[in-house]
Each structure stands twice: as C-alpha cells, then as structure tokens.
C-alpha cells in the first residue's frame, strides 16, 4: 500500500460492500470436500465440484439441504439440523485448505485501501467460517466490517437489511457505496438497499452474470476500478 489516500477515490465511491464466496474467494473446493466427508458415511454418493458451485450462495443449511436433495431424500428436521451443525464443525477449521482468493483480488484490495475506501463483507456464509478464511488467506486486514449469514438472526441476503447493517457499521450512505457480487442474491439485496452492483463473471450462478441485472459486469478484478469510476447512483437524488 504505497499510494496515499485521496479525498475522491473513484468518482462518488468512498465505500464498498463485497460478497465473499464466488466473488472474492473460490471456496467451492473446500465446501465440496466437507460435503464429501459427510455424505458417503451416510450411504450417499459424493457430489461433484460443478454441483457444489451451484449449491453455494444461500448459506450452509441450504447447501447441506441441496447436498441431501441431490443424493436422496432430505432427512427429518431434527436429524437434518444435527447434520448442519456437524458440517459447520467439520468445515470451519478446514475452510481455507483448498480455498483461494481469485486472481487479482489482492491487487484490487491493495489499491482500494490505498485510495482510502472503506471495505466490508456481507456473506451468507457463517461468520465463524468467514473469519477463519479471512485469517487463513490473510484477507482480514482489508475489511472494516464483516457481516455473516448468522450475524443478524433471521436476516441474510437477498434481504437488503443485511447490507444496511454494513452501511450503518461503516457509517456511510448509499450515495457513496456500491456492492460487488456474483449472483442474484447480491443484485436483489443491493437494489433493495438502494445500491448499484458490480458483478464478477467468475462466480457461482446458474444464470450468466450479464443476465442478472447488475449495473456492471467484469471478468477480472483489474477491471473493477474502471467500472466503479463510472458507476451511477441507483437512485440519484
């Protein structure tokens, strides 16, 4: 971080909210590994990487549900809840073994921080696993605020209150903030909160990023600052 911060970093943008899985990090390999440690002992087949990529985005309980759905029946609630808890307990301490940041992510974060931009994360991943990965990949110092999928009881994306909590904790308004994501939950939450959204095309989504309704789509983090510099407010006053 060699460049001094500026007073007008990227047009109107002085803060950003990032999604995590499929946006900043490729976490599917570790999630697949955890799923495949869970399923065979229960007499179920393993799940493939592409399958798991399309299961990600709605939090661990939904991912576990989709794993069961893909390999047989969903267990009764009491049993299912135990499997979710066991999955989290197994996954969290091993969550950064195979997970990595996408190409260009560190360079982009370095540049954004050098410009004085406040950065936060809003993810449907559990907070504990999120913090473990941030620490394991040495991403933690970049972020002022982290909101996990279990940080706000009953609230996660696409609920815009998930992003509004980050705005409040950063002390910023929608006029000077944008969302960086990869799937429909990010677009819905961002637009519901009054934020424009930039989408990474490398993410975990059944629908191509260009068809999700974001204000910009980029293929690599080296395009992020150019996209942000020309981003218009979603609801200009």
Image (cartoon, rainbow, N blue to C red):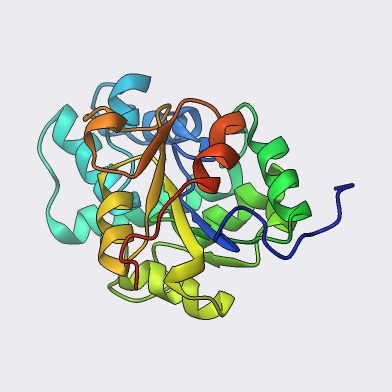
Residue closer to the observer: 59 or 33? 59
Q: Is residue 141 above or below residue 68?
A: below
Task: Tell which residue pokes out farthest to the right in this image.
Answer: 2
Q: At x 46% / y 57%, what residue is drawn?
A: 178
Residue 48 visible to an observer of this rendering: no
Horizontal side, residue 187 vs residue 163: left or right: left
Question: Hey, which quadrant is residue 4 in on the image?
Answer: bottom right
Q: Where is residue 197 drawn, in percent x and y? A: 38, 50
Q: Where is residue 42 drawn, in percent x and y? A: 27, 34
Q: Is residue 127 above or below residue 29?
A: below
Q: Is residue 100 above or below residue 59?
A: above
Residue closer to the observer: 237 or 18? 237
Residue 84 visible to an observer of this rendering: yes
Question: Hey, which quadrant is residue 67 in on the image?
Answer: top left
Residue closer to the observer: 118 or 86? 118
Q: Where is residue 237 drawn, in percent x and y? A: 34, 73
């Amino acid at each position: 971080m060699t460049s001094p911060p500026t007073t007008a970093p990227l047009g109107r943008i002085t803060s950003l909210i990032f999604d995590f899985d499929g946006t900043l990090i490729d976490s599917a390999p570790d999630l697949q590994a955890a799923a495949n440690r869970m399923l065979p002992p229960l007499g179920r087949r393993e799940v493939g990487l592409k399958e798991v990529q399309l299961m990600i985005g709605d939090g661990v309980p939904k991912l576990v549900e989709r794993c069961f759905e893909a390999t047989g029946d969903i267990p009764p609630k009491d049993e299912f809840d135990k499997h979710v808890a066991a999955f989290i307990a197994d996954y969290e301490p091993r969550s950064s073994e195979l997970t990595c940041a996408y190409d260009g992510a560190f360079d982009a974060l370095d540049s954004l921080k050098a410009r004085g931009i406040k950065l936060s994360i809003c993810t449907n991943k559990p907070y504990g696993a999120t913090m473990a990965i941030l620490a394991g990949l040495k991403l933690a110092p970049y972020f002022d605020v982290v909101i996990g999928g279990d940080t706000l009881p009953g609230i996660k994306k696409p609920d815009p209150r998930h992003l509004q909590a980050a705005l409040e904790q950063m002390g910023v308004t929608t006029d000077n903030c944008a969302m960086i994501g990869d799937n429909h939950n990010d677009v819905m939450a961002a637009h519901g909160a009054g934020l424009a959204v930039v989408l990474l095309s490398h993410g975990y989504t059944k629908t191509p990023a260009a068809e999700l309704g974001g204000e910009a789509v980029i293929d690599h983090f080296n395009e992020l600052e150019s996209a942000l510099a020309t981003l218009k407010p979603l609801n200009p006053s």
